[in-house]
Amino acid sequence: MTAERETIVAAVVAAAGGTLISRVRMQKSVYLLDRLGLNSGFEFEYHHYGPYSRDLDLATADAVALQMVSETFQHREGDGARYSVFNLRKDRPADDAFGQLGPKRASALAEKFASANITVLELAATVDWLCHAEKCEDWRAEVSRRKPLKVGGGRLDRAVTLLTDLGLPPPS
């Protein structure tokens, strides 16, 4: 049985060390955790920043409303863009909220995602989506077409390395 959706959100924040920065990171972390065994039950579709779940967005709002997590806002120094900071407000959720991953593996993964460059994490989730959900054979050309400003500077290669380290390597 899958845990309540807002409990899964709290579990992901807990697994990330009690703090998770940005809604984009929440979406990509849950997507990749699902691919690895979280089994959240959230349905994803492709959106501007890659895999996105409206249900996860609503569950995040529910977790905040139920005071399982808090959401505060900060602004980037460079351009002033606002982003969310989620903090766990209650005790760590029960082990079943971590799906087949279990709390220890979920924590190792979520901490890796929490410390990853956000663009690299976004690219990793997008590459995996293109390969897994869209069955795109030329995923490298497609991700470069969809995210031309983000793939440079070695970020795409770091995203592929991240996926490979997770056991989700894209086809060569």
Image (spheres, helix red, strand yellow):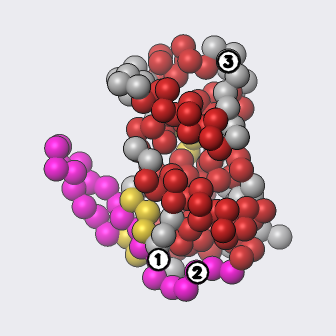
Alpha-carbon span between mark 3 and mark 1 = 39 Å
Crowd rating for badge 1 (residues with CA inside 10 Å; few <14, some 14–19, many 20+): many
- Residue 105 is one of the magenta-drawn residues: no
In the image shown, does 169 or 151 lie closer to the viewer? 169
Read off the magenta span.
72-94
Query: Type of residue at label 1?
Result: Leu
**Position of 115 compared to 8: left or right?**
left
Query: Type of residue at label 3?
Result: Ser
Crowd rating for badge 2 (residues with CA inside 10 Å; few <14, some 14–19, many 20+): some
Instruction: Kindly report which numbered mark, 2 or 3, lies closer to the viewer in this rendering.
Output: 3
SS at badge 3: loop
Alpha-carbon span between mark 2 and mark 1 = 8 Å
Residue 32 in view, yes or no: yes
Question: Which disc, if any, is residue 88?
Answer: 1
In the image shown, does 148 or 169 lie closer to the viewer? 169
Determine which residue is flagged by label 2: 92
